[in-house]
Image (tube, helix red, strand yellow):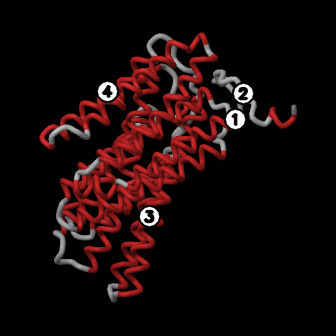
């Protein structure tokens, strides 16, 4: 009896949306770390493509690959906040999703360099079909959420069939078919939740998004430190590299300060508000992940100044930082902040983007980012 109970499954019942002190589980943290592997691969390839002069191709490919990573992560996160049972089957299914993201990561180079999305698609479909099994399990035990769960399962499955079919389309249809299927993917939650919204735990989701942002920013610091230290070991541009390292630290620290200056729990509630919060984070996450690529490109430009134009090298860092600050301001700061923060922050983002055309753009970006932090310190935002 004791032996058999080890394999017993817990009923996949909805979690209490008002559960006090709900925190991320160790499985969720492990899940995040595996996903950051794929983000790291994508940012490295983005840096290489920019260094080779293929900026447009690199940005588009990065945006496409990042969608697959972000969407699978987001869907797991929102499901987990509603139906996480933490039994052995739930854990195994989650580990299958981790395997899928590792397959996806293995295909990032082919996708971004050669537009071959075969491995990325296989890894993505593995993750999404594992998610279908979770929704089917939830449908079996929850009459009140059965329609919602079955809509999710049906919608996700249908779109995965189309993703696989896309691999056999001619190259001329590859790009447009990608964006059509992206639209289909993001429509699934809106259509599925219309009848009955799943019980979202606002505090838990806000924490999960914050933790993923934190990991992305940490990955940026690690990648940039690796590039700078490696360069210092072999080259003589010590002062320029140390200046860049200091600027990179200030920039990433400012991004952290800005993001965690406000609690976002009250952004999650109605379906519309929750979707706006979740979907807007695509830009925030993608920008945070791209900062490491920008720093790597800046290092390469210092070491090999003739290989890339000053404008392209500067934009690789300034544009992601500006996007991060501007998007987060529009989503989270603007509704909560006073006149000072709401004036300085968007202007700062515009000035950071404009610094692309000036020498020393990394230092300028660091200074402007620090000024936004100073404004937040001078006029702290009152959280609810």
Q: Real-space Cα distance between discs 4 and 3?
A: 39 Å
Question: Which tag is nearer the camera, tag 4 or tag 3?
Answer: 4
The numbered mark, 2 or 1, whose residue comes first in the sequence reads 2
> Which residue does the numbered mark 3 point to in the structure image?
250
Mark 2 packing: few (<14 Cα in 10 Å), some, or many (20+)? few
Identify the element where label 2 is drawn. Answer: loop
Residue found 39% across the figure and 56% down from its top = 106
**Depth-wise, is mark 1 or mark 4 nearer the camera?**
1
Q: CA distance from mark 1 to mark 3?
A: 42 Å
| Label 3 CA crowd tier, 10 Å (few <14, some 14–19, many 20+) | some
Residue holding disc 4: 184
- Helix or strand or loop: what does disc 4 sit on? helix
- Please tell me which of labels 2 and 4 falls first in the chain: 2
The residue under label 2 is 10
- 58 vs 223, left or right, is left
- Badge 4 vs badge 3, beta-carbon distance below 8 Å: no
Single out the residue that lies furthest toward the right. Answer: 1
């Amino acid at each position: 009896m004791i032996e058999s109970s080890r394999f017993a499954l817990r009923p996949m019942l909805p979690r209490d949306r008002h559960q006090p002190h709900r925190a991320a589980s160790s499985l969720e943290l492990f899940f995040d770390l595996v996903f950051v592997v794929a983000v790291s691969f994508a940012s490295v390839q983005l840096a290489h493509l920019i260094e080779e002069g293929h900026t447009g191709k690199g940005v588009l490919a990065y945006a496409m690959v990042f969608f697959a990573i972000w969407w699978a992560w987001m869907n797991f996160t929102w499901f987990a906040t509603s139906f996480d049972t933490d039994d052995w089957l739930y854990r195994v299914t989650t580990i299958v999703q981790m395997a899928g993201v590792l397959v996806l990561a293995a295909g990032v180079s082919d996708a971004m360099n050669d537009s071959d999305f075969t491995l990325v698609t296989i890894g993505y479909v593995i993750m999404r079909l594992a998610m279908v099994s979770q929704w089917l399990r939830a449908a079996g035990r929850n009459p009140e959420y059965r329609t919602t769960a079955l809509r999710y399962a049906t919608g996700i499955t249908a779109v995965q069939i189309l993703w696989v079919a896309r691999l056999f389309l001619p190259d001329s249809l590859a790009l447009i078919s990608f964006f059509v299927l992206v639209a289909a993917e993001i429509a699934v939650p809106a259509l599925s939740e219309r009848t009955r919204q799943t019980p979202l735990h606002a505090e838990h989701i806000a924490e999960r998004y914050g933790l993923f942002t934190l990991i992305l920013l940490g990955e940026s610091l690690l990648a940039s430190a690796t590039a700078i230290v490696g360069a210092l070991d072999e080259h003589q541009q010590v002062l320029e590299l140390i200046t860049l390292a200091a600027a990179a630290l200030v920039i990433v620290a400012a991004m952290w300060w800005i993001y965690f200056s406000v609690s976002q729990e009250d952004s999650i509630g109605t379906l519309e508000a929750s979707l706006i919060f979740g979907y807007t984070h695509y830009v925030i996450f993608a920008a945070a992940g791209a900062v490491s690529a920008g720093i790597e490109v800046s290092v390469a430009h210092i070491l090999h100044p003739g290989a890339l134009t000053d404008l392209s090298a500067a934009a690789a860092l300034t544009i992601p930082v500006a996007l991060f600050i501007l998007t987060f301001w529009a989503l989270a700061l603007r509704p909560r902040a006073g006149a000072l923060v709401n004036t300085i922050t968007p202007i700062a983002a515009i000035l950071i983007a404009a610094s692309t055309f000036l020498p020393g753009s990394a230092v300028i970006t660091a200074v402007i980012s620090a000024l936004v932090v100073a404004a937040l310190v001078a006029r702290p935002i009152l959280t609810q």
